[in-house]
Amino acid sequence: MARRSAPTVNAGSMADIAFLLLIFFLVSTTIETDYGISRKLPPPNQEPTDAVVRDRNLFQVELNQFDELLVEGEIMKVDGLKKAAIAFLDNGGGTGKLLCEYCKGSHDATSSDNPNAAIISLNNSRETSYEAYIAVQNELIGAYTTLRNREARRLYGVSFVEMEELLKETKGEKEREVLKKRIVNIREMFPQKLSEANPVN
């Protein structure tokens, strides 16, 4: 009696289908990317400096574990921080070599001499929420952006933010060089000096 062979399934095309499905999912799937806060760290300091910062040139911002904001020793709401930071940075209280000719502040002798001397110091607790920390960061960066926009419009007729966008889009080498010089000039007028101390318990 002849033996009958067991029926088999031709699985050759199954590998092709699996491979096509794999390619489809790889092409059509989007991968979530977490973005952090963009920060440019200063270059490592080779020689220790004994720089003395006058109290009037230091704007102290503190954020505690209850997300309460203390600015220059006084309790403040986050939405008032930008205005206070602008008043400090744009004060122009210096005289002689420290005189700021483009500052439009109150020229208070007890506040910052000029934007190059003005430093914002941010201290926060380890228990501070991310939301509060980022909100404070946004207000402080917004103060610098507002002042840079003002000076860019005064000098070049276009805001600082628009100049940065134009630099990304401009293809011509000469135009790029002009834009770069203008951007550097505005940054030097209002340098971003934001000092962040290690979080405390």
Image (cartoon, grey):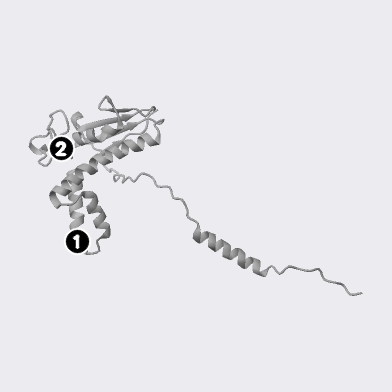
Identify the residue at the far bottom of this view: 2
What secondary structure is marked by label 1?
Answer: helix
Label 1 Cα neighbours within 10 Å, binned few <14 / some 14-19 / many ≥20: few
Q: Quadrant of residue 103?
A: top left
Q: Mark 2 belongs to which amino acid?
A: Asn
What secondary structure is marked by label 2?
Answer: loop
* Residue at 13% over, 38% down: 104
Q: Quadrant of the N terminus?
A: bottom right
What whole-number distance in Å separates the C-alpha atoms at marks 2 and 1?
A: 31 Å
- Please determine whether, in this image, residue 11 is positioned above or below residue 127: below
Locate residue 172, reporting x and y percent: 22, 64
- Mark 2 — residue? 114
- Mark 1 — residue? 175
Identify the residue at the far left of this view: 96
* Residue at 54% over, 62% down: 24
Q: Mark 1 belongs to which amino acid?
A: Glu
- Please determine whether, in this image, residue 103 is positioned above or below residue 15: above
Total marks placed: 2
Q: Quadrant of residue 142?
A: top left
Q: Are marks 2 and 1 in contact (CB under 8 Å)?
A: no
Near-viewer residue (152 or 199): 152
